[in-house]
Image (cartoon, grey):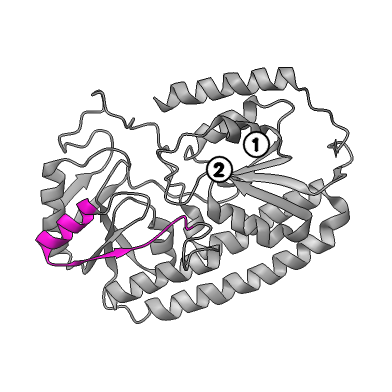
Amino acid sequence: MRFFAVILLIGLLVIAGCADMQTETDRDTKNGAYGQVINVVTTIYPLADIVSELGGERVNVSYLMPAGASPHTYEPTVEQAREVSQAHLFIHIGAELDNWAVDLAKAAEPGPELLDLSQVVDLIESAGYRTVEHDDHEEHLDCDHNHDHDCDQDHDHDCDHDHGPDDPHYWLDPIMVRDEICPAISGQFASIDREGKGYYEGRLNNYQDELTDLHKDIEAAVSGFSYQGFISFHSAWQYFGQRYGLKEVAVVAQFPGQEPSAGWLAELIGIIREENISAIFAEPQFPVALAERIAEESGIDVKIIDPLGGEGVTGRESYLEMMRFNLAAFEEAMQ
């Protein structure tokens, strides 16, 4: 259904563009300068917050996904399509996570510049395509796995739809954000607004210092953990785990938007016992009831971690706050 919704939005966007042609009087891409504040649209809130920190008063930023929504299942609105068409710069996660928004940006006339951040980071393989090992048993969590799923059946989820073989959740690694994402965004601002280059460099340095402090705090906390393995609701935490020596042993929903099979849920309970897992990490973007049922049957706790945060979400209204919120949840479960 989402495919047809995106096609409809693109059609409406094209019609709107023909009816109200924009001019280039306020945007001069040849000399690399804008005659106004740079309008930036991102797909997810953490990116919008990072953009705001790096761009300051020279950038106006908005984001498409509301708090509580998931990029795996979100459908954009006509108004958001118009918003993307009027932006100077569109920044997205890439790695096929937010293709629904990229289609809108590419259909817009004259359309924004696009910055695909997946092109500036070293991606790792998605858990949906890797092998999870526990004891002497191997379970292949891909579209060929045998957990009562059939990728040819008429599910709301498409095995190729949410993202490809690369894990797109790299923003949950603060060092990747500090060393790769932030310089790429700041550099894009400077190329658009050359007069602001020094301003952007100063804000970049300040924000990188804050990210370094965050990283040190996470390292210090993780060094005291009694457990290293964890189970999350969906596989968003591989980069975080890899950075800090933690292991995402398995996930509840191998494909977000599709109900896990009874066989896989039973096997998860076995994995929890074998791997001495202390808690299941659920997320606000997905129903928590399933994780609670597994936890109850396994005799462990459910903890909430949040990869997206949002405006008005207590304790998660900035990228830094969101990551500290998640650290606190890991500490409670794994110390």
Q: Which residues are magenta?
A: 289-309
Residue drawn at point x = 43 percent, y = 46 percent: 69
**Would residue 10 be found to the left or right of residue 166 on screen?**
right
Element assignment for label 1: helix
**Would residue 304 be found to the left or right of residue 57 on screen?**
left
Q: Quadrant of the N terminus?
A: top left
User: For this rendering, which residue is in front, 87 or 16?
Assistant: 16
**Spatial separation of the CA atoms under disc 2 and disc 1:** 9 Å
Work out whether 96 lies above or below 172.
Answer: above
Task: Please tell me the numbered disc located at residue 64.
Answer: 2
**Would residue 332 be found to the left or right of residue 16 on screen?**
left
User: For this rendering, which residue is in front, 324 or 174?
Assistant: 324
What's under tag 2, amino acid-wise?
A: Leu
Task: Please tell me the numbered disc located at residue 83.
Answer: 1
Work out whether 93 lies above or below 335.
Answer: above
Residue drawn at point x = 18 percent, y = 49 percent: 138
Residue drawn at point x = 51 percent, y = 68 percent: 321
What's under tag 1, amino acid-wise?
A: Glu
Residue 292 falls inside the magenta stretch: yes
* Dot 2 crowding, Cα within 10 Å, few <14, some 14–19, many 20+: many
Work out whether 304 lies above or below 215.
Answer: above
Q: Tell whether label 1 touches label 2 (CB within 8 Å).
A: yes
* Dot 1 crowding, Cα within 10 Å, few <14, some 14–19, many 20+: many
**Would residue 322 be found to the left or right of residue 152 on screen?**
right
Tell me which numbered mark, 2 or 1, is placed earlier along the sequence: 2
Rendering quarter of residue 16:
top right
Residue 274 falls inside the magenta stretch: no
Residue 216: x %, y % from top left: 51, 77
Element assignment for label 2: loop
Residue 107: x %, y % from top left: 63, 25
Residue 165: x %, y % from top left: 40, 39
